[in-house]
């Protein structure tokens, strides 16, 4: 049988494509090697349908706020770059006009005008960042936490453009040299990925509330918004609360008592 | 042969490129890897029970796939307990479980990784235990 | 046919080497960025996209604008475009290649780029953008290369290519609409959150694309024997003029909506771009240069006696291309991030490495374009007459 050079190249090319495609298809389609029964949750883990938080600004003083921020940034190995261009922050203070732009007015009392509001990822129920992520590196978990999978992030920063709350930070360079004291129990990040508050998913998994809540002396109330009997629902029933930019329909899960 | 000289030069360049990894490999990693499992944490275990989450052969062959699935289970599904085939429970965590025993990254992980020339980026984020010396 | 690209004059090779030098400089700058991280660019926590994504956006438009040549030729049998349809298609190939490179150099973890395929996410516009761009690249290479091949053999193209040509025509607007959707569907970025974004994208693309092709045609007339045809150049001038008017009108609609409604969030980015906010004025010269260039280009393109003057037309085409580049390649992306979600102004300006990488990618684009054009023009020089029997090569 004689084969022309053209035919030969065609055959070789298509079998290479089929071969490679086949291998990757098997890799993708093959289910994991573990039985579902081998995987479980820690029995102590806190579970909920939609985690949320109320920030009671009446109770939250400046020092407590600072403690909340410090503990979060310390245990999560958030670097201190001391440079607004490349700054990384998970939870930080903003004044009223910046936290709630458009809500301020000229006759506002000086105390509220200069008060610092604690802001963090809003853990939206309808998160635009998740909608735009091309790799599902940021995704919403079943318990409502808008989570980051650092292994998967390609660093396109679409989520940063999509987030109306400026909650996301990008690692413009290797963050490790800027971490004062490493928490050996928690990973750092590498350059080129986006990060943000994850509602301390790693603490919830072992039965602890988020670190900021623990440090807040009761000013931050954390709980399951879907559980009518929860403390957070009681607070939301009995107090007037506001959310940041609620008009955008992202359904933030962070509420403020002013 | 038309353009004989050019073809020969082209072939030489091609062959050079193909064998370049062997020419450029240097002296490193020629010794057979010998990962050490003599860390204090491992030595503390009774001799008969010195085993990883699964048996040695399985871990040797599959640890990378296992870690890959672990991270998805933990990060994406919020499940963090792994029950081994022997029925023992472990927290799925590279940094807090694996590296607690294998606290000798340079003598354990790097030993084989260097030999086979892979550079997993695990430790770009996960903090490796501090090693003596 | 590719062998035609390795036989050229001294001038051709000097140009290729010049481009290779630019590419080399860009590549070195990229290695630096790859090692240190995107911190070497001017981008920041607040302005998290910059020059790279701007170039991507602009070039998607240039790529899509091939349809302004291909559509009249294939759907309306506009014979004057017979000779240059291939020029449009090859501009599309070079532009889409640059688009993909600009996305790539903008990634924080470029080695993970295939995660987009490994974890396909249909709800992400970026996923769709990748699909439409790859598809468009394929269609243009296929149609351009095949039709040039049949031109060389002096046989009419086979029937099977026709559906691909029609598909490419329909596909062209989609790439730019999807690119507009990257921006216009984001809550809280007032400058982008407007339904007219896609329309403005298309109109500015169909103004800047023909402008580029006019410049290229004039250069080819001067430096090669190939004559794209004066009538074709004039028609592209008219296309550019109409779409330029539409673009300016669409922008003014935005300005009206923002300022008559008096909604602060809508006014701020426009104020920032044209007057600066709180003394932050980095982009003000960019916007006024853009405005001035358009003010000069528009009358030349619109008034027939000016447009028919080769030199004036060339100037207007360059001015249009540049002005729309300033608008879409820089101010559109940066303006969307200023003020930031906290109503603070944090400015952006590209750094030297970032500029070098950008120049390097443009260099690659122009190299692709040069090679493809070299092939196309060599073919045309061989066969001398276009398919309507008119001489396309000057002796």
Image (cartoon, coloured by chain):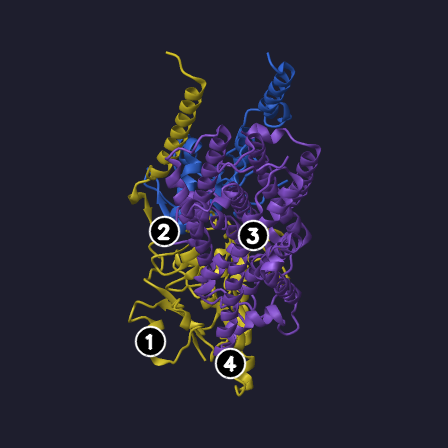
Chain colours: A yellow, B blue, C purple
Q: Which residue is mark 2?
A: B77
Of badges 4 and 3, nearer the viewer stands: 3
Marks 4,3: beta carbons within 8 A: no
Number of other residues with Cα within 10 Å of mark 1, as a class: few under 14, some 14 to 19, many 20 or more:
few
Tell me: C121 left or right of B40.
Answer: left
User: Which residue occupies 54% across, 81% down?
Assistant: A113
Which one is in front in this view, the residue at disc 3 or the one at disc 2?
3
For the N terminus of chain A, give its image quadrant.
top left
- At which x and y percent is residue C146? 46, 34
Q: Earlier in the sequence, mark 4 or mark 1?
A: 4
Q: In the image shown, does C26 or C321 lie closer to the viewer?
A: C321
Left or right, A216 with reference to C319: left
Q: Quadrant of residue C35?
A: top right
- Mark 4 vs mark 3, CA separation in Å: 55 Å
- Pointer 4: what residue? A104
Q: Is residue A35 above or below residue A162?
A: above
Q: Which residue is mark 3?
A: C234
Using the rendered image of the protein, determine whether residue C82 is visible from the camera's viewpoint: yes
Find numbered disc 3 in the image and state the secondary structure of the residue it sits on: helix
Q: Chain of mark 2?
A: B
Frontmost of labels 4 and 1 is: 4
Rendered location of residue C45, percent (x, y): 57, 60
Q: Are marks 1 and 2 in contact (CB under 8 Å)?
A: no
Mark 2 residue crowding within 10 angstroms, few (<14) / some (14–19) / many (20+):
some
Residue B30 image position (x, y, % from top left): 59, 24
């Amino acid at each position: 049988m004689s084969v022309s050079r053209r035919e030969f190249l065609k055959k070789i090319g298509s079998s290479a494509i089929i071969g490679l495609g086949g291998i990757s298809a098997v890799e993708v389609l093959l289910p994991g090697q573990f039985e579902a029964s081998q995987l479980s949750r820690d029995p102590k883990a806190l579970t909920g349908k939609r985690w949320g938080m109320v920030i009671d600004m009446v109770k939250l003083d400046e020092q407590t706020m600072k403690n909340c921020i410090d503990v979060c940034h310390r245990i999560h190995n958030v670097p201190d770059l001391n440079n607004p261009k490349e700054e990384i922050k998970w939870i930080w203070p903003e004044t009223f006009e910046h936290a709630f732009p458009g809500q301020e007015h000229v006759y506002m009392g000086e105390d509220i005008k200069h008060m610092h509001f604690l802001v963090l990822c809003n853990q939206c129920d309808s998160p635009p960042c998740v909608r735009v992520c091309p790799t599902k590196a940021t995704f919403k978990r079943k318990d409502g936490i808008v989570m980051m999978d650092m292994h998967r992030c390609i660093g396109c920063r679409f989520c940063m453009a999509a987030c109306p709350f400026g909650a996301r930070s990008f690692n413009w360079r290797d963050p490790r040299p800027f971490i004062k004291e490493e928490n050996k129990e928690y990973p750092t990040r590498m350059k080129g990925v986006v990060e943000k508050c994850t509602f301390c998913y790693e603490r919830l998994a072992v039965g602890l509330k988020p670190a900021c809540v623990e440090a807040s002396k009761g000013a931050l109330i954390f709980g399951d918004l879907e559980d009518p009997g929860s403390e957070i629902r009681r607070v939301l029933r009995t107090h007037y609360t506001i959310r940041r930019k609620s008009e955008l329909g992202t359904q933030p899960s962070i509420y403020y008592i002013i | 042969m038309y353009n004989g000289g050019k073809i020969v030069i082209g072939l030489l360049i091609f062959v050079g490129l193909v064998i370049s990894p062997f020419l450029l490999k240097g002296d490193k990693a020629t010794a057979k890897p010998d990962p050490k499992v003599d860390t204090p944490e491992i030595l503390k275990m009774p001799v008969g029970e010195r085993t990883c989450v699964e048996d040695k052969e399985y871990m040797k062959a599959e640890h990378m796939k296992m870690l890959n699935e672990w991270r998805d289970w933990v990060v994406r599904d919020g499940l963090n307990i792994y029950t081994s085939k022997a029925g023992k429970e472990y927290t799925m965590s590279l940094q807090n479980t694996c590296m607690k025993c294998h606290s000798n990254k340079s003598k354990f992980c790097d030993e084989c990784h260097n030999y086979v020339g892979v550079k997993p980026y695990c430790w770009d984020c996960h903090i490796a235990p501090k090693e003596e010396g | 046919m590719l062998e035609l690209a390795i036989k050229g004059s001294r001038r051709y090779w000097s140009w290729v080497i010049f481009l290779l030098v630019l590419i080399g400089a860009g590549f070195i700058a990229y290695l630096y960025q790859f090692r240190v991280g995107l911190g070497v660019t001017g981008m920041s926590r607040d302005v998290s996209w910059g020059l790279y994504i701007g170039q991507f956006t602009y070039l998607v438009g240039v790529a899509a604008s091939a349809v302004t040549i291909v559509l009249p030729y294939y759907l309306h049998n506009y014979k004057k475009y017979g000779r240059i349809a291939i020029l449009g298609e090859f501009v599309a190939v070079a532009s889409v290649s640059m688009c993909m490179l600009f996305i790539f150099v903008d990634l924080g973890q470029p080695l993970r780029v295939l995660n987009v395929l490994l974890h396909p996410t249909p709800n992400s516009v970026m996923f769709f953008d990748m699909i439409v761009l790859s598809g468009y690249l394929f269609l243009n290479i296929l149609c351009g290369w095949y039709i040039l091949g049949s031109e060389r053999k002096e046989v009419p193209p086979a029937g099977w290519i026709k559906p691909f040509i029609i598909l490419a025509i329909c596909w062209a607007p989609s790439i730019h609409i999807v690119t507009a959707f990257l921006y216009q569907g984001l809550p809280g970025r007032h400058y982008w959150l407007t339904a007219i974004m896609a329309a403005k994208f298309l109109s500015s693309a169909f103004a800047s694309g023909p402008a580029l092709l006019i410049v290229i045609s004039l250069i080819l007339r001067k430096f090669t024997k190939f004559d794209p045809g004066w009538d074709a150049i004039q028609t592209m001038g008219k296309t550019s003029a109409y779409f330029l008017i539409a673009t300016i009108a669409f922008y003014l609609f935005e300005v009206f909506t923002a300022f008559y409604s008096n909604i602060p969030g809508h006014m701020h980015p426009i104020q920032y771009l044209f007057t600066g906010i709180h003394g932050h004025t980095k982009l003000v010269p960019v916007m006024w240069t853009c405005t001035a260039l358009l003010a000069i280009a528009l009358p030349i393109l619109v008034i027939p006696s000016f447009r028919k003057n080769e030199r004036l037309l060339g100037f207007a085409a360059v001015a249009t291309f540049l002005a729309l580049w300033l608008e879409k390649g820089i101010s559109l992306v940066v303006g969307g991030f200023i003020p930031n979600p906290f109503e603070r102004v944090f400015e952006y300006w590209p750094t030297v490495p970032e500029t070098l990488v950008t120049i390097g990618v443009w260099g690659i684009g122009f190299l692709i374009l040069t090679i493809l054009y070299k092939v196309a023009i060599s073919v045309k020089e061989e066969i001398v007459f276009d398919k309507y029997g008119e001489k396309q090569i000057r002796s």
